[in-house]
Image (cartoon, coloured by chain):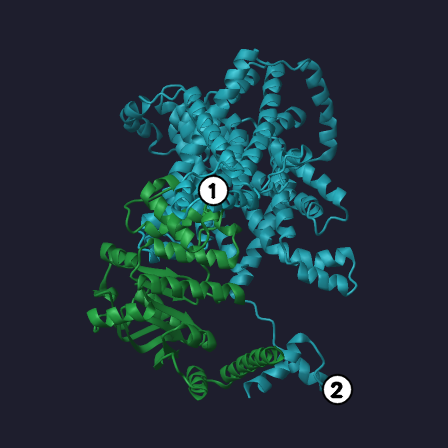
Chain colours: A green, B cyan
Amino acid sequence: MRELSSETNTATDAAASVIEVANVTKTFGDTVALNGASLSVRRGEIVVLLGLSGSGKSTLLRHLDGLEEPDSGTVTVLGEPVSTLAGKRLRALRGRVGFIFQQFELVPSLTVLENVLTGALARVSGPRLGLWGYNRALRLAALGHLDRVGLLAQAYQRADTLSGGQQQRVGIARALMQNPEILLADEPVASLDPESSDQVMALIREIAMDQGLTVVCSLHQVDLALSWGDRIVGLRHGEVVLDTPAAGLSKAAVMEIYGRVATTTAELDAIATELESARATDLIGATAESAR
Amino acid sequence: MTLTAARPRAAARSGRPSGGAGDRGTLEARAPRRRLSPEKIAAGLTLVALVVASVVSLVSIDISIPQMIESWGNAQNFFERVGVISFPEPGDLLYLTALTVGLVLCGTLFAAFFSVPIAFLAAANTTPGRGWMVAGRFAGVFFRAVPDVVLAMVFVLMFSLGSLPGILAIGIHSIGMISKMFADAIEQIDEGPRLAIRAAGGTTLQEFTSGILPQVLPSWVATVLHRNDINLRGSVILGYVGVVGLGLEMSYAFKSLDYSLGLGIALIIFALCVVMEIVSSVVRTAMLGFAPTRRSLGDRLLRRLGMRGRRVDPADTSAASAALARKMSRADARTAALRRPWDAARRRNTVWGWAAGLVIIGSVLISDIQWGDFVTFWGYLPETAAKFWPPSFGSYDAPTMIAAMGETIAIALAATILTIIASIVIGSLAARNVAPSPRVRSGMRLVLVSIRGIPEIILAIVLIVVTGLGTQAGTIALAIGGIGLLGKLLADSLEEVKPGPEQALTAAGASRLQVYAGATAPQGMKALIGHSFYMLDTNIRAATILGLVGGGGVGYFLLNAGQGSRYDLVTTIVVMILVTVLVVEALAMWMRRVFR
């Protein structure tokens, strides 16, 4: 399925890049968040932005949805010059790009269904209060997306009664409600336990492949990035330091990636600890297998 | 490298001996000096000056206990003379009660309605620009500073008799507090959901209705209910300037020396205030679906009755619909899910929604609003405005009026210092982490809610009966009334302090009093200063109002000027009050900033 869709993609729009970031620089006060970053993503690609916190992943993603304006450089998404758009045209573009947040960002006091429906706001005009502010077709569509993420039964529960993993699935359903062409995800599993993390990441990938969505997802765990993405883009201090396909990377290359995204000794220490635990897990896995 | 350099300094600051006894001298030399910013010193001196002024005021008002005991005899005589307390006819009583409640409710809702756009402009995270924000915040301060009694006086002139002057006076004055609380609530929201709606392509208005409104609604409802309670208590005084309802009947009764009927109506108003507090507590619990905080009288009664707010168990509804879903095909399940199940939450919301709607419609109907007045009003406007302008001192001279204003300020200051002293004792004992036993705590909490239930005006009338006309009655009435509010605020603030330092001191073997002085009180100090200024602010306006019933100060002149149609003098007095309140407000803002 995946092979098929990517083949048709290459056949029809081989050169069609849906995201084009050129030399974007962004500073917040004294901190340089992005330093001449460039990135090009083709339709249907599943890209992971890899980097430690503060490397500029979130800032880059927010630029793609017009949530930040670059100091210099240009951002083009779906053929639209995001960095210069405003008002109606910017909102129309945002409607075509779904965004999944690290902290889910649901309205806690609203029902799950109402939260999903807010994904349709770009398509309707004016304010909408309550469930009946949206027409039947939209409500049915929202229920469909909830069913897709496995939360149909929870439609009328308050969002804050759900677990973290469930809330993030509502976040995904809300993004799907936009009928997006691109899905942006900013550390979607950083606030989740390992089990929910796996579910959520698998769900995002599954949906992306089903619907042929382009995905840009930021992560800080190298192992997860390598096993999940098609292409890894490494960021360090706001610069793109790595751009490689994820498949078939050697152990040495992985070590190299760790080295590239980290800079200081403290960061390397952190990575060493992470590697240690990864190795420990491998060991446990190996022992379990040999025991079997 | 930097780490090692910092070490000795850190050790010195924490007071640990960094070496042998030999370098004690150098340690003293190396220890950093305590630095105080000039602004902090100035603020501290201002605070001291205010306290001194309050004590001087207190002495000058000369509240003598023996005199009060003596005048207790007067009270006895008085009550003997009153004989049995009488009430209006049941039919009249019912109508007057409904009218008072309806009018107050209309006024509060009017304020709530207009507070939304003002709050939107005044909140730092929604305002379209800094200028708008300042304007929004200033509008709040301004509306708060104009006493509703003065507004009512003006509106009674401009509208044909009826409830409209009262509704507008309550409404416009309440915008001050409600818009401020609404704006504060907006500033405290979680920005995430709003960002999510922006990321999905929502407009600014959609961000507000879908991202902000659901978050602030519980706090907004609580604010409106709270303000409605305040307005009901305040509506009594509006009767003195001609606003219909129980207050007007009471003022007639007292003016015609029918004390038995006057006290009867006062009793009814007190009962009404208590009932209203219970009702708003029930509404808060039921509409918002959270357990009562057990801080108000109503919450207490609710708890006694075992009617605590219950949260709906999400498991049962979801399990039921899941079972339903299993039996059906996917598409059918989705279509079926379009119908929202009638679970407890939905039933509750629907019932309360309809009830609230009916009460609002009922309030509008009973208030019998003369909508035509809104048309004719504009005709009267220039004529009325001309009566109020230019301001003048009328038949009095400037020193007399300034002395009267000074007297009002003295009453407010004296009352505030009395309130602070009493509130520190009662409020501390009412805090869970200070009270020696739960029984003491609930006893003190009960004292506080009981005091809050009594409208200050009724307190003042009773005290005037006891101590005779004058500043003493006003001061004591304000001081007692203030305890209800300041004591509660202080107790809440003390309960919210971080428990860590208290535990640390307890673990170090400190006594209960030492823990209070060493850990609890210092953390609550900032709140005490803030709340005390709020109290002073409230008291200056209240001191004016109490003057209307003979509590002394500028209020007496205000009432006379109003009744004698000297509207230019009314303007002068209002300007004096406004300036005073704004000065206090500015002082309070400065203190809050300095002692952050």
User: What separation in Å lies between label 1 and label 2 (alpha carbons)?
Assistant: 61 Å
Q: What's the chain of the residue with tag 2? A: B
Q: What's the chain of the residue with tag 1? A: B
> Is disc 1 in contact with disc 2, using a CB cutoff of under 8 Å?
no
Is residue A243 something one can see in this rendering? yes
Q: Quadrant of the N terminus of chain A?
A: bottom left
Few, some or many C-alpha atoms within 10 Å of disc 1 (few <14, some 14-19, many ≥20)?
A: many
Q: Residue at x 55, y 62 (%)?
A: B41
Is residue A54 something one can see in this rendering? no
Q: Residue B116 vs residue B495: left or right?
A: left
- Of labels 1 and 2, the one closer to you: 1
Few, some or many C-alpha atoms within 10 Å of disc 2 (few <14, some 14-19, many ≥20)?
A: few
Q: Is residue B339 above or below residue B513?
A: above
Q: Nearer the viewer, residue A44 or B358?
A: A44
The amino acid beneath tag 1 is: Trp
The amino acid beneath tag 2 is: Gly
Q: Nearer the viewer, residue A49 or B518?
A: A49
Q: Quadrant of residue B553?
A: top right
Q: Residue B584 vs residue A180: left or right?
A: right
The residue that label 2 is drawn on is B20
The residue that label 1 is drawn on is B220
Q: Residue B330 vs residue B488: left or right?
A: left
Q: Is residue A147 above or below residue A278?
A: above
Q: Is residue B575 above or below residue B467?
A: below
Q: Residue at x 77, y 47 (%)?
A: B437
